[in-house]
Image (spheres, rainbow, N blue to C red):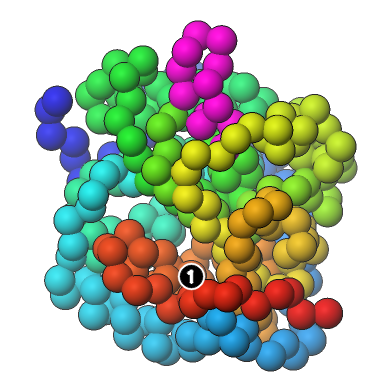
Amino acid sequence: MRAALPWIRREATGVGARRAIAGSALRAAALAAILTPGCALPYREPNPSFAVAHAEAASDLRRMAESPVQLDRPVVVLAGIGDPAVSSAAIIAALRPCLAGPLVEVDFFDEHTFEGARQKLLTAVAAALFVDVDHLPAVDVVAFSMGGLVARDAAILDDAGRRLPIHRLFTISTPHEGARLAGIPLGTPQSDDMKQTSDFMHRLRSARRDYELVCYTRLDDITVGEEFAVPAGADLWWLPTPSGEWAHMHAFEDERIMADLARRLRGEAPFSTLPAAPLPN
């Protein structure tokens, strides 16, 4: 296998791609306006099982950047719904200095169904790692919001015998059990699929998970709902949302989450410790 670039980003190129992006800009702007909750948040006590402060996390990210650690396997970073790689780029920017090895970035800005997103993910990873789509290597995945659902779907064997072999899946504010705002008219079938009772959600619940799942969220997320950010049988690592920030849309740049993630990817002890504290009332 040819050596993969340390940061491999799937870019849209050409006139057709530029037109598609321009035509989607208005939809993306409307989507962002709907998905961003207000910033007036109540005070929340820190999570006793994830008690790391922003300053401590930022300092630790600088410590890790001084001595990057070789990855055990490629890391695939996935953006959320209607997102032209803003979230994935922020995650890459935080993790890249701490790690040595291939990071593959995939966004789904031009995909409006989970099936289309799944196929894009499989083909993008294959192209980035210079392998055939039928022989994908084991990867770790870091996903924001809807990207976590795409990863879970891609891990299920399809009729063609294809799947993404996920070793570890790290999700940030992913609607694992549906989303509070699912079903609102966003002009994309993915919104309906994220309803708790949808066939798509039932497919994910019914599938066996053969990978480690680590779920992060921030409190007062009215877009997804922190109570929906973890599937049955997995632990949830929650954090209070800082005053003045959007709970959902700023989660992908939270230093506390990024530092914990980087530690796990480097094989170090994370800040989050078992047993995971339950969500506060």
Q: Residue at x 55, y 27 (%)?
A: 156
- Which quadrant is home to the C terminus? bottom right
10 Å neighbourhood of mark 1: few (<14), some, or many (≥20)?
many
> Which residue is the extreme one toward the top?
160
How many marks can you see?
1
Q: Residue at x 36, y 64 (%)?
A: 264
Identify which residue, 129 or 106, lies in the foreground.
129
Image height of 236 relative to 22, above or below: below
Identify which residue, 166 or 109, lies in the foreground.
166
Residue 274 percent coordinates (x, y): 53, 75
The answer to whether any part of residue 155 appears in the image is yes
Residue 179 percent coordinates (x, y): 78, 50
Image height of 2 relative to 139, above or below: above
Residue 69 percent coordinates (x, y): 18, 62
Label 1, on which residue? 257
Is residue 155 in the magenta section? yes
